[in-house]
Image (cartoon, rainbow, N blue to C red):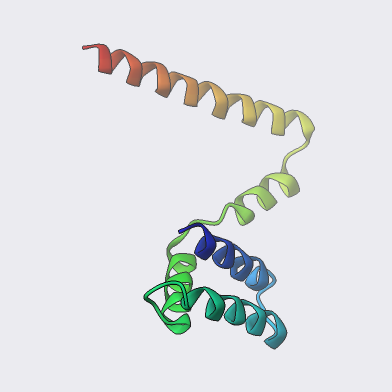
């Protein structure tokens, strides 16, 4: 459900600073009210689904913030290369396993 994802993203951005103001929340809920007419769910149900999704999702913000705060440029490049090589190795292993 693409439209619901847009509102989930808007909600996640709104709460990213740890505080959502009434105007932000009202705009998100008004948008959900508009699409609830096309769906078989109320805007409150849609909002509850979004909140549950946000609570169960993984945010990389803290991870990236730690890297940016604690790594210099060379360390960031080395770390990125390590991740890329590990991912490539994983993909290669999976391809070999599929062949068997």
Which one is in front, 91 or 85?
Answer: 91
Asked whether, in this view, residue 36 is left or right of residue 25, the answer is left
- Residue 64 percent location from the top left of the image: 65, 48
Q: Residue furthest bottom?
A: 22
Which one is in front, 67 or 57?
Answer: 57
Say above or below: 97 vs 36. Answer: above
Q: In which quadrant is the N terminus drawn? A: bottom left
Asked whether, in this view, residue 23 is left or right of residue 38, the answer is right
Q: How many marks?
A: 0
Q: In which quadrant is the C terminus drawn? A: top left
Examine the image and state in which quarter residue 90 appears.
top left
- Residue 69 percent location from the top left of the image: 74, 49
Q: Residue furthest left?
A: 100
Please name the residue shown 44% across and 19% down the image: 89
Which one is in front, 74 or 51?
Answer: 51
- Residue 29 percent location from the top left of the image: 58, 81
Q: Residue furthest right?
A: 73
Say above or below: 89 vs 76. Answer: above
Say above or below: 22 vs 54. Answer: below
Say above or below: 58 vs 88. Answer: below
- Residue 68 percent location from the top left of the image: 73, 46
Please name the residue shown 71% across and 31% down the image: 75
């Amino acid at each position: 459900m693409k439209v619901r994802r847009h509102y989930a993203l808007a909600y996640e951005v709104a709460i990213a600073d740890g505080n959502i103001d009434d105007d932000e929340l009202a705009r998100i809920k008004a948008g959900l009210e508009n699409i609830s007419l096309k769906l078989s769910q109320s805007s409150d149900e849609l909002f509850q689904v979004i909140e549950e999704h946000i609570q169960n999702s993984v945010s990389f913000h803290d991870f990236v913030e730690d890297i940016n705060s604690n790594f210099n440029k060379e360390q960031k490049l080395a770390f990125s290369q390590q991740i890329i090589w590990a991912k490539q190795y994983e993909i290669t292993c999976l391809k070999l396993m599929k062949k068997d």
